[in-house]
Amino acid sequence: SYVLTQPPSVSVAPGQTARITCGGNNIGSKSVHWYQQRPGQAPVVAIYYDMDRPSELRARFSGSKSGNTATLTISRVEAGDEADYYCQVWDSSSDDYVFGSGSKVTVL
Amino acid sequence: QITLKESGPTLVRPTQTLTLTCTFSGFSFTTRGLGVSWIRQPPGEALEWLAVVWWDDDKRYSPSLKNRLTISRDDSKKQVVLTMTNMDPVDTATYSCARTRMAGRFFDFWGQGTPVTVSS
């Protein structure tokens, strides 16, 4: 089965930039989506189609992809960005929707 | 405004069958390219996709759980129902439904989720 690998945690000071990686075999051929899940809340889509952002989400969130890694970048980090972040792809070979293990962002 | 809300039992005994209902509003299930999925999250663990039913009534299941899952829809009630047989304590999780986009295969609106504990 297809596996997505994320770092368990990312720590960043307010105002700095957080980068959350998501590694997967041949991920370049797949659309990568990112979800933000604040404590006790439902996930919300943060980035879809690798780099598109919902209109209601601030421009501080961006997505990119290079080689076998996708990256979610949060610029000018704020306390409200503390959350778990999950990447997700659809694996066509198994018709399965695969989530990464999640990365907890802590604002120092 | 698009909303989804899950309902069902909070406690299930081992070997029993779990039945969960997702009631949605703000969109039509007849819209081409839309579906509703079920996704679960064990305490402190990652998200796991379970099943999806599409606008054309096509149904797909997680390869690892497909033998235990059945998803169905009731358009008149705007509901999607998931049944999972032979429940085990490892199935303890928060179960959520989410609107699913076929283009891109992602989940654009989520319900709050409903917790289910499997225990004797």
Image: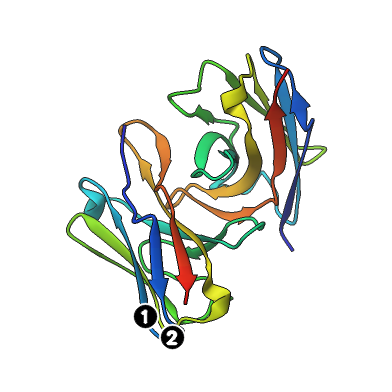
User: x and y percent of residue B41 in the render?
Assistant: 57, 41
Residue tagged 1: A17
The amino acid type, in three-letter code, at marker 2 is Arg
Q: Position of residue A63 (x, y in %)?
A: 36, 69
Mark 2 — residue? A76
Q: How many marks?
A: 2
Disc 1: which chain?
A
User: Which residue is drawn at the image coordinates 43% and 53% (left, top)?
Assistant: A102
Q: Residue at x 51, y 38 (%)?
A: B49
Are both tags, 2 and 1, on one chain?
yes
- Horizontal side of A97 relative to B9 (left or right) equals left
Which callout, 2 or 1, points at the residue further toward the start of the chain? 1
As displayed, is residue B42 above or below residue B32?
Answer: above
- Describe the element under mark 1 as helix, strand or loop: loop
Q: Which percent across, then down, holds residue B102? A: 48, 47
B32 vs B119: above or below:
below
Residue count near mark 2 (Cα–Cα under 10 Å), binned few <14, some 14–19, many ≥20? some
Q: Is residue B83 left or right of residue B60?
A: right
The amino acid type, in three-letter code, at marker 1 is: Thr
Compared with B44, B8 (above or below) is above
Residue A84 seen in the current view: yes
- The residue at the point 47 percent across, 29 percent down is B62
Q: Quadrant of residue B6?
A: top right
Relative side of B7 to B37, left or right: right
